[in-house]
Image: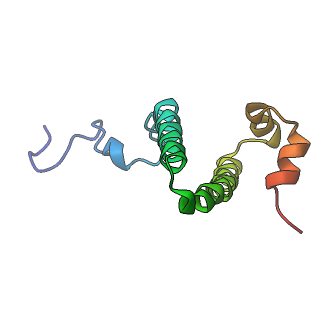
Amino acid sequence: MTPPDRPAKDKNTVKPALTPKRARNTVENDEYAAFARRVLRAYARRIAAGDIEALTLLLNLGTDVENATRHAVIGLREFGYSWAEIGTRLGITRQAAQQRWGERP
C-alpha cells in the first residue's frame, strides 16, 4: 500500500497542460479573417463618407498586410511547413513564395 503523501508508481502525475507535446488549441481563423474584412470594409465606407485625410492611412494598411503576411510565412516555415505547402495555399508556386518571402541576401 502506498502512503497517502506519495503517489502510486503507476499513476501519471504529470499535468497535461505542462507537457510540451500537447495538442494546439483550435483557432477559428475563418471567423477572424471575416471580422478583419468587415472592419476594413467599414473603414472604407467611413472614408468614402468624406474623410479624405484617412485615405493615406487606408493605403498604408496594404503595407501592414504585407508585413503581417511575411511574419506569418516566417512562422509557418519555423513550424516546419515547406515552401510548396505555403505556395499551394496562396495559389502560387513554391519558387514564387520563396522569392517573395524567403531570406534576403
Q: Is residue 94 left or right of residue 65?
A: right
Quadrant position of residue 83: top right
Residue 80 pos. (x, y %): 70, 45
Q: In terms of depth relative to the viewer, which is nearer, 97 or 19?
A: 97
Quadrant position of residue 53: bottom right
Q: In terms of depth relative to the viewer, which is nearer, 46 or 14?
A: 46
Residue 22 pos. (x, y %): 44, 40
Outermost residue toward the front?
50
Outermost residue toward the bottom?
105
Where is 34 relative to 103, above or below? Answer: above
- Image quadrant occupied by the C terminus: bottom right
Q: In terms of depth relative to the viewer, which is nearer, 10 or 24?
A: 24
Q: Residue at x 53, y 38 (%)?
A: 37
Color scheme of the displayed model: rainbow
Q: Is residue 43 left or right of residue 70?
A: left
- Image quadrant occupied by the N terminus: top left
Q: Residue at x 67, y 50 (%)?
A: 69
Residue 8 pos. (x, y %): 22, 40
Residue 75 pos. (x, y %): 64, 52
Number of marks in the rendered image = 0
Q: Is residue 90 left or right of residue 79?
A: right
Q: Residue at x 79, y 54 (%)?
A: 101
Q: In terms of depth relative to the viewer, which is nearer, 1 or 105?
A: 105
Where is 94 relative to 6, above or below? Answer: above
Q: Residue at x 62, y 61 (%)?
A: 56
